[in-house]
Amino acid sequence: MRKTRNGRPTMKDIARDVGVHVSTISRALNPKSNHAVSSELMDKIKRASARRDYRPNAAAAMLRTNRSRTIGVVVPDITDPVFPPIIRGIEDALAHHGYVAILANTDGDARRQTLAVEALRPRGIDGLILASVMRDDAEATRIAAGIPTVTVSRSTGDPQFSSVVHDEDDGFRRILTHLASLGHRAIASIAGPQTISTGYNRYSSYVRHSELLGLGQDRPLASFARAFNEMEGERCAEELLVAGRPFTAVACANDRLAVGAITAFRRHGIHCPHDVSITGFNDMPLADRLSPALTTVSVQHYQAGLQAAERIIDMIENANVTPTHIVLPVGLIVRTSTRSLTRAPDKEAGHADTSPINDNKNSRHKREEEL
Amino acid sequence: MRKTRNGRPTMKDIARDVGVHVSTISRALNPKSNHAVSSELMDKIKRASARRDYRPNAAAAMLRTNRSRTIGVVVPDITDPVFPPIIRGIEDALAHHGYVAILANTDGDARRQTLAVEALRPRGIDGLILASVMRDDAEATRIAAGIPTVTVSRSTGDPQFSSVVHDEDDGFRRILTHLASLGHRAIASIAGPQTISTGYNRYSSYVRHSELLGLGQDRPLASFARAFNEMEGERCAEELLVAGRPFTAVACANDRLAVGAITAFRRHGIHCPHDVSITGFNDMPLADRLSPALTTVSVQHYQAGLQAAERIIDMIENANVTPTHIVLPVGLIVRTSTRSLTRAPDKEAGHADTSPINDNKNSRHKREEEL
DNA sequence: CAAATTTTGGCAATCGATTGCCACCGTTGC
DNA sequence: GCAACGGTGGCAATCGATTGCCAAAATTTG
C-alpha cells in the first residue's frame, strides 16, 4: 500500500548526516537532557536539523511519553460572546508554552459534555479546561477523572477541580448598590439558569445584597431564565410584567438577558431607562453601543482564560500541585440603561414618570407560567 | 522512571480477553477491514472492548497511519464576531466525521500565520482551514504545501486552494441598489483593507456598481480602513469628513466599520439615519439591536464553516479531488440605519434635512484632531 | 473424495522518538 | 601507573496500533 514515509526527515536522517546515533539527536534536541551533549556536537546537530528543516513527529513522541501537549477546551457555544475572549486567553497562554487547544462545543447539554470529553480523551489530551460545567456536575468529576482539569468562568461543587471564576458576588453588590444610590427600591431580577454556578451565584447575591441594602422587597421578585440569551430575556421580562408586582429596575444575570428584556419592555411601551432601569453582566462587546448603552459589570474574560491555561500547565508539568481557586475582580460600568429616580429626568422632554412598573390596580394576579 | 503504561486498556488486553491476536482486534474495530472477521467473533470483541471501556490510542494509530483526524484552523482573531460562527460550523462538521479542530490566532499578522501553521504541521494535521489568508498570499501557498487546504470567508489568488466565500459582489450590488432606491446618489464608502480579499472585492464592487447604477460620483469617494474594526471605522469617517466631498450615505465594508462610523459622525453632530445613511456587511450579532439598527448584508458564516470542513474532509479521504470554489449567496437586511432621501422623514419631528454632508459653505475646513 | 477456493486470523515488521543502561573516553588523584 | 570519576554517546527495548503476507480452517466445486 501507500508508503507511510512522508518525505519528512526523521531523527534517523539527522543522525546519519551528523554521524551519531539517533539517541544523541534526541538528547540534543531535548532541553531536559541536552546537558549530556558536548557543545560542538550540539552545534552540528542544530545546524543539520535546521538544514533539513527537521520537525519531531509529535505522534511518535506522544506514543512514547504519553504526553501530547494538547489541551481539551470544552465550551457550551463558541458563538456566545463571552467565550471567544476566554478561548483567546487560553490559546495565547498555551501557545506560549508550546501547547495547543482542541475545541468542543456542547450547547449546554451535559450529555454532550460527556461525549466531548470522551472524544478528546483518546487523543491523549494532557489537560482539560471546562467552561461548560454545571453546578454540582458529578458527571464532570467522573469523566475528567485522571486528567488535570480546571473549570473557567464557572465552577462545580467539586473542590478537586481548580477553577478560575469572577467575583459574581461583588458584581451584584455593585449593581444593587448603584441602583439603590439612584433611588431604586423595588428592584426585580432576571436570573440565569440555577443549574449553572454563575446563574446561581448571581441570584444568591441578588437576594443577599437586596436584604443587606434594606431594599424593600418582602420576597425576591425574580424570573428565571432557562438559558443566557436574548429570547429568554424577553420571556422573563414578560413574566415579570405578568407577575404584577411593582418594580423600577431590573438587574439581569447577564447582558444578553438584559438586551432581551429591554426589547420586550419596549414592546409594551415601557422604555429603558425612562420607565425602567436595566442592568446586565459581562460587559460584552457592543454593550456600549447599544441603545440604551448597558450599565453592566465588566469581567476579565481574557484574563480568566489566560489564568486557566497557566493553571493547567502548572498542574501538568509539576505533579501534585493542589487545586487552586482563583477569583478575578470585576468592575461596575455605568452607562445609560440606568437612570436616577430622584434626579430630574434628562434633557428628554415628556413627563418624568417615577412610578414603578406594575404599580397600578391589582398587583396580585397570579402569574400564569411559573417554572 | 515513570511507568508509561497509563492504566488504559490496549488492544493487547482485549486480545487476551477474547483469546485472539491483536491484529484480529484491530481489524474487527476498523470498519474498513472488519469484513475479514466473523460476526460472532465481532460480537465477542465488541463486548470485550466495551466491558473494558477500550479506546484506541490515537498516537499509536497516528504514528502508524500518518493520519491524525485533526484539522488545523487558523483565524485572525476569534474575538472578532464573524469568526465564532465559522468555527462553530467547522467544528460541527468535523465532529460529525470524527475529526477535531486545533485552533490558532494570527491577529492578521502574516508572519504569525506562518508560525501557526508551522506549529500545527508537526502535530500531523491532516488538513488546514485558513480564515486568515491575505489576497495574493504566496506565503500561504508555501507553508500549506503538501497539506489539503481550504480557505474560508477569504481567498487568495492561488486557485490551488479550495475556497468557500460569500458573494461579496452581489452584497454590494444590493446595498448600492437599496441606497439608490432611497434616492441616494452621493454614496461614499469606508473600504476594508485591500490586502484582504473581502476588503478588495467589496471595494471593487462598490466602484463597479456605482458606475453601473449611474451614481453621480465622478470618482469613487472612499476611505480605506487598515483593519475591520470600530476604531478604524471612526478614523475613516473622520477622513471622509475632512475630504470635504459631499455624500448622503456611506457603504461600509463591514458592520464594525459601520458602527465606528456611526459613532464618529455622531460626535460631529451628524446623526444616522437622519443626516446620513450607513450600511454594514455581515449582519453580526446585535446588529439588529444597535441604535440605529444596521442595514446590512447577511452572510452565512456558519454554512461557510460547515462547507469548508466538508470540503477538507473530502479532500483528505478521497485523493485527488480537484479544488472547488464555493460562493455562498448573501441577503440584504434593511433596518433603520438607512433612510429615504425623497420620502418624508419618519414620525420624528425636526426639519427634514436632505442636503449632503460636506455640501454647505466652505467644505474644506481642516479637522482638528487627526490622530 | 480430492482439489480449488474462500474465510479467518496469526505473525511480525513497522511508524519515529524516548530513555535506562552500559561502555568507552580522557582526566585527575594517589 | 592504576583506580576512580565525570562526561559522552551508543544500544536496544519500548510505546500501541496497523497491515502485508501467509497458513490453517472452512467451504465450495468438480
Image (spheres, coloured by chain):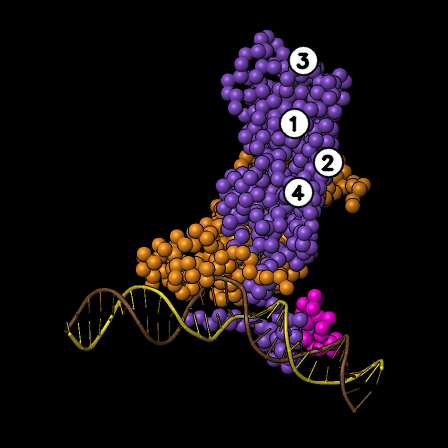
Chain colours: A purple, B orange, C yellow, D brown
Q: Amino acid at mark 3?
A: Ser
**Which residue corresponds to mark 4?**
A163
Mark linked to residue A330: 2
**Which residue corresponds to mark 3?**
A355
Q: Do marks 3 and 2 share a chain?
A: yes
SS category of the residue bearing label 4? strand
Query: Could you say which quadrant of the image residue A218 lies in?
Result: top right
Q: Mark 3 near mark 2, Cβ–Cβ under 8 Å?
A: no
Marked residue nearer the N-terminal end (3 or 4) = 4
Q: Do marks 2 and 1 share a chain?
A: yes
Q: Mark 3 near mark 1, Cβ–Cβ under 8 Å?
A: no
Chain letter behind tag 1: A
Marked residue nearer the N-terminal end (3 or 1) = 1
Nearer to us: label 2 or label 1: 1
Q: Which residues are magenta?
A: A28-45
Q: Nearer the viewer, residue B161 or A238?
A: A238
Q: Amino acid at mark 1?
A: Ser
Marked residue nearer the N-terminal end (2 or 1) = 1
- Percent across and percent down for residue A300 are 70, 40
Residue at left 73%, top 71%?
Answer: A35
Marks 1/4: CA distance? 20 Å
Marks 3/2: CA distance? 32 Å
Marked residue nearer the N-terminal end (1 or 4) = 4
Q: Mark 4 near mark 2, Cβ–Cβ under 8 Å?
A: no
SS category of the residue bearing label 2? loop
**Which residue corresponds to mark 1?**
A204
Nearer to us: label 3 or label 1: 1
Q: Nearer the viewer, residue A123 or B86?
A: A123
Q: Mark 2 near mark 1, Cβ–Cβ under 8 Å?
A: no
Whether residue A276 is visible:
no
Chain letter behind tag 3: A
In the rendered image, residue B19 lying in the magenta stretch gets the answer no
